[in-house]
Image (cartoon, helix red, strand yellow):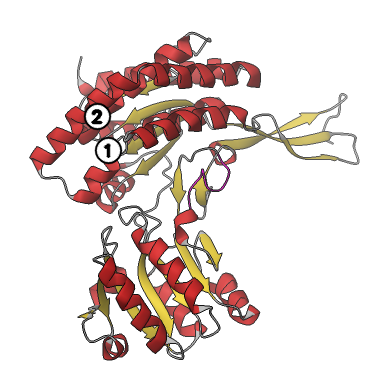
Amino acid sequence: MSLHEEMIQIGTQALDASRELVLSNSRKKNAILLAMADELEARQDDIAAANAKDIAAGQEAGLNPAMLDRLLLSPARMDSMISSLREVAALKDPVGDKISRWLRPNGLEIVKQRVPIGVIGIIYESRPNVTADTAGLCIKTSNAVILRGGKEAVHSNAAIADALTAGGAKKGLPEHAIQLIRTTDRDAVRELVQLDGYVDLVIPRGGEALIRAVTEQAHVPVIKHYKGVCHTYVDESADLEMALSIAINAKCQRPGVCNAMETLLVHEAVAEPFLSALAEAAADRELELRGDAAARQIVSTMGEATEDDWYEEYLNLTLAVRVVDSVRKAVDHINAYGSRHSDAIVAEAESAQRAFTQEVDSSTVYVNASTRFTDGAEFGMGAEIGISTDKLHARGPMGLEELTTYKYVVHGKGQIRE
């Protein structure tokens, strides 16, 4: 069987499974999710051994530290993966919810209600926990899912997918509702995103190169974010102790993820005390600072930022720093160089907060909090299918509701249009 024929078969199986999933009620789907979590828990040692193979292969292949960090399934991440499935099971099922209802003068009752999207393709790199998180969210919303992980996590993804399907089958998970593409052939991605008529939506999760390649090749809709160039702006009205805590957390708590801060903007009125304190904190954390001329005048050890730095998603302990003279200049910088992901202001002045939240064109905007909270679990979604910087049909962290669309159900009593 050729790769094309194999992918058509996978698409056909997913489509059939999605039609069976539509008939599953919330109680059954929750039982499936809990059984999937139980099976993951029972197979933790097997999954850890598979992950160790991937880590060893990644080290031998020279994967960068950020990629290796994403690849690692630590005991804490394993526990989080299992608990996320249980949390999703406990969440309200959006399928069938009546979004709105109205009655027309002719007596027609029109109901707008949530329904599954159908078949969803997930293309992702490194993070093997995505296998469980996305499968769980798709099953909860009655969507069949086709998973295509990166070759660097091939053993981990297979072990997790096998556990999910085995556990789910015990409670009636339809066959082929969760399918993992196991070939490492790069053409499988192209085939998947061109399965028009079988796949309804593709969500890529990974680096900018992967997402651009998927978008350029796709024949089906794609929800994406190219990169996470996130900012924190420290206003002249900021509590500087709070601002330093937020900035260090946003950059250093886990620098290799898309919601980590990459550029810090500081109002000139507080630049000297704030950047001096930041430089001390940076030295303790081996954080490299690259600043504009005004920032380097305050911190002489700071490297020089180039134009490219304002666009850069470092995914490591490097931070670009710029001094601005107003909230307006901060907003202009973010809208010019940012990626519409997550941006924060630290300010006490309500006028500054209001200007920032109204005018920054990003999926998630924070006031006096770290950008690191842009995450489905942190938003109370249980898990997330991804973070969208698109404006249609979903934006920001995508949970259960974002994996549904809607249909109109119209009830009549014999009405005909004159």
Q: Does the segment drawn in magenta span residue 354?
A: no
Mark 1 and mark 2 lie on one chain; the one further toward the N terminus is: 2
Q: Which residue is mark 1?
A: 72
Q: What crowding class fits label 2: few (fewer than 14 Cα within 10 Å), some (14-19), or many (20 or more)?
A: many
Q: Residue sitting at 27 percent across and 46 percent down? A: 210
State the SS at label 2: helix
Name which residue lies at 52% across and 10% down: 172
Is residue 409 shown left or right of residue 224?
Answer: right
Q: Where is residue 301? Give x, y as percent.
A: 21, 82
SS at mark 1 in the image: loop
Reading the image, the residue beneath label 2 is 51
The residue carrying pointer 1 sits among few (fewer than 14), some (14 to 19) or many (20 or more) residues within 10 Å by Cα, namely many
Question: Residue type at mark 2?
Answer: Asn
| Relative image position of residue 269 (x, y in whole percent) | 46, 91
Secondary structure that dominates the magenta span:
loop
Placement of 126 over or under 390, stated as above or below: above
